[in-house]
Amino acid sequence: MSAFPDFESHLRDGELSEAKGPIAVILVEDGAAVGATPTHHLRGGFKTLLVLSAQPIPDGAVPPESAERVVNLRYNARQAGAHVAVVNALIETVPEDTWLYHCYNAEFLFFPFSETRTISEMLAFHAEERRRALLTYVIDLYAPDLQRFSDAVSLSEAMFDRNGYYALGRKDRQGGFLDRQLDFFGGLRWRFEEHLPEDRRRIDRIAIFRTRPGLKLLPDHRFNIEEYNTYSCPRHNNLTAAITSFRVAKALASNPGSRQVIRDMTWRNSHPFRWNSQQLMDLGLMEPGQWF
């Protein structure tokens, strides 16, 4: 991991044209959890991690025994639409049918039974159900005390909202409802919605998907092929996953318009996060579908 090539040149070098998935892409926007984020996803079983950052991640940020699976690439992840440009470039570069996952630093993927099963096992089952994309819910994490944790990040004392989540039917341009698509809301984006643009209040993200020609990621974390945006197949419920994320909490704690107003992110429904998939399943924040 000593080399630090830029993202575009790495694509041109052709090393990813034969890459084996699943591949995780982590866009590093700041210094929060820059070691914990890739380490968590390495434990989940991703074969390759692309960590995109403006500066090299610190030596020793990931376990030495897993360092060969991590490629740190130079990229400005804070620029507008960074995730769109990166993901669409990778879709055109990696082999067809490669599973890709994308997130930001201080975000942590959980899927059903993720403590004892790997991401490859889960995606193999999902593919058997003829699914090419997997819906993830972004569950906001936040520190319990902004006086002690000014950036709203605490891995050891993370809190989340145990309820207050809801969904609305998703409409097409003609005003009709799209088949098997919903807009999901909740967490900090719901409680402090006046501090977020309307187009950033949803918590659903198609963060895991299988590549195919012509596929494009859109700025709102959906795809240009509508079936990719569905939460299940027509026959029965499918797997869903969760991305626990400090990203909104960090923004609320640092943006001038909100940091002077928000003194505390906890409320009566705040609950300690135990960093396991069972807690999220028990609260209905992801489901195993037919995978037992």
Image (spheres, helix red, strand yellow):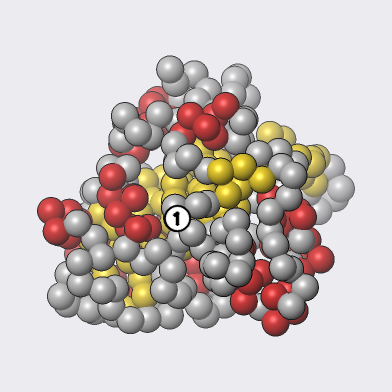
**Vertical position of residue 91 compared to residue 77: above or below:** above
Please state, as top left, top right, bottom left or bottom right, where the N terminus lies in the image.
bottom left
Q: Is residue 14 left or right of residue 160?
A: left
Q: How busy is the neighbourhood of tag 1: few (under 14 within 10 Å), some, or many (20 plus)?
A: some
Residue shown at 61% from the left, 66% from the top: 146
Q: Which residue is mark 1?
A: 155
| Relative image position of residue 268 (x, y in whole percent) | 74, 44
- SS state under label 1: loop
The residue closer to the viewer here, 146 or 44, is: 146
**Vertical position of residue 206 compared to residue 83: above or below:** above
Please state, as top left, top right, bottom left or bottom right, where the C terminus lies in the image.
top left
Whether residue 7 can be seen here? yes
| Relative image position of residue 274 (x, y in whole percent) | 48, 40
Q: Quadrant of residue 3?
A: bottom left
Residue shown at 65% from the left, 51% from the top: 203
**Vertical position of residue 180 compared to residue 56: above or below:** above
Q: How many marks?
A: 1
Q: Residue furthest right?
A: 175
Q: Is residue 228 left or right of residue 101?
A: right
Q: Is residue 162 left or right of residue 175?
A: left
| Relative image position of residue 66 (x, y in whole percent) | 17, 54
Q: Amino acid at mark 1?
A: Leu
Whether residue 137 can be seen here? no
Q: Is residue 225 left or right of residue 9?
A: right
Residue shown at 26% from the left, 74% from the top: 58
| Relative image position of residue 81 (x, y in whole percent) | 55, 72
The residue closer to the viewer here, 74 or 271, is: 271
Residue shown at 24% from the left, 48% from the top: 47
